[in-house]
Image (cartoon, grey):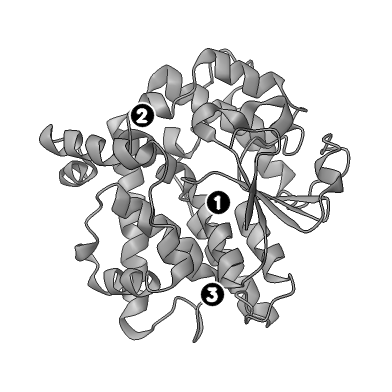
Amino acid sequence: MVDQASGFEGKTRHRYDLALLSPTSATRGTGVSAARILRKSQLAGRVSMQLDDAQVTNKEVKNWQGVHLLHFDASSCSQRVRILLNEKNIAWESHHVDLRKRQHVTPWFLSINPRGVVPVLVHDGVVHVESNDIMERVDKLPSEQAPFFPEHADARATVKEELAFQSSLRLGTRALTVKFMAPQAMYLKNRKVLEAYRKNGLPDLSRDMEIAWWQSAADNGLSPETLIQSFAAHRDALRRLEDRLQNREWLHGDRISVLDIAWFTTIHRLKVLRYDLSRHPYLLSYYQHLLLRPAFREEMQIKGPLKIIVPAYRLYKRMTGRQLEDIVVQS
């Protein structure tokens, strides 16, 4: 892996609230309601993993050859793609996009991915987005390793459906991260950043949804109800995994798959947030087993300023009785 700067330094039902993009709350200052955005998204159906030429206005990346990944070190969605690339021993070039420095709202990044999120895979000049779809693309790249997606169509469809369920927790994971991982000022976007996010790229519905969430979080905060619901959704999902792992080694089939990678990133994020995995003994053993694999163990490392900030913030939360586990009593 080579790290390049590239213009930068260095099927489940939901009760939609802030953590799941509330359709009842209008985002102030955006001129568009979250409800309208959500309805448009539902009508639009599933978004494509590959951006067409008109969506990518950056001429530089269209000339990139090989496998390039634009990613952020602390992004769970980036983690799963990095794990798969490394598990399959695929050579790739790293382009770190520092979300802490708001590099994802710059014209340069939005000219590559107008959705304004990481990770982004560029393979021989073609841009791919959405982490689950990127993993599917990566799994098709030449490799001596066995595939991580099932080859049989029915099994593949089942895995993709379960990936979609796991991804449905994403905004809840974000809410818990913003509240419990580090001071919220590191995550929440001010008016200037949100305006840049809005203006610096081509119009894009997915980016509108991202802006709506961050605008609402900045204006209204993260309510206790939102955090309790997010915690409960994750706890219930882990209980489901616990039941499955009582009589099997892997989440699907008889070997490691993309499901194991995807759920590992969520489990690990919850562990960083001080979720008590001992309430799920089979899941804890499974998590520890995955950590024996170098590609997974590498993702345990907290890097950059968070290496100091996260432990200090966890100590503060524990001393003040405001850590993640303290909301268990209310859920």
Residue to which mark 2 is pinned: 222
Q: Nearer the viewer, residue 179 or 31?
A: 179
For marks 1 and 3, give the one nearer the viewer. 1
Residue found 45% across the figure and 69% down from its top: 294
* Crowd rating for badge 1 (residues with CA inside 10 Å; few <14, some 14–19, many 20+): many
Residue found 38% across the figure and 48% down from its top: 302
Q: Amino acid at mark 3?
A: Ser
In space, the residues marked 1 and 2 are separated at their CA atoms by 24 Å
Q: Amino acid at mark 1?
A: Ser
Looking at the picture, does residue 166 appear above or below residue 37? below
Q: Where is residue 233 shown, x and y percent of the image?
A: 36, 51
Looking at the picture, does residue 291 appear above or below residue 193? below
Residue to which mark 1 is pinned: 78
Q: Nearer the viewer, residue 247 or 35?
A: 247
Q: Amino acid at mark 2?
A: Leu
Q: Quadrant of residue 174?
A: top left
Give the mark nearest the N terminus, 2 or 3: 2
- Image side of residue 130 versus residue 306, left or right: right
Q: Where is residue 246 shown, x and y percent of the image?
A: 31, 81
Determine whether label 1 and label 3 are within 8 Å by CB. Answer: no
Give the mark nearest the N terminus, 1 or 3: 1
* Crowd rating for badge 2 (residues with CA inside 10 Å; few <14, some 14–19, many 20+): some
For marks 1 and 2, give the one nearer the viewer. 1
- Image side of residue 233 versus residue 37, left or right: left
In space, the residues marked 1 and 3 are separated at their CA atoms by 17 Å
Looking at the picture, does residue 280 appear above or below residue 52? below
- Image side of residue 160 versus residue 52, left or right: left
Residue found 33% across the figure and 52% down from its top: 270
Residue to which mark 3 is pinned: 257
Instruction: Give the mark count.
Output: 3
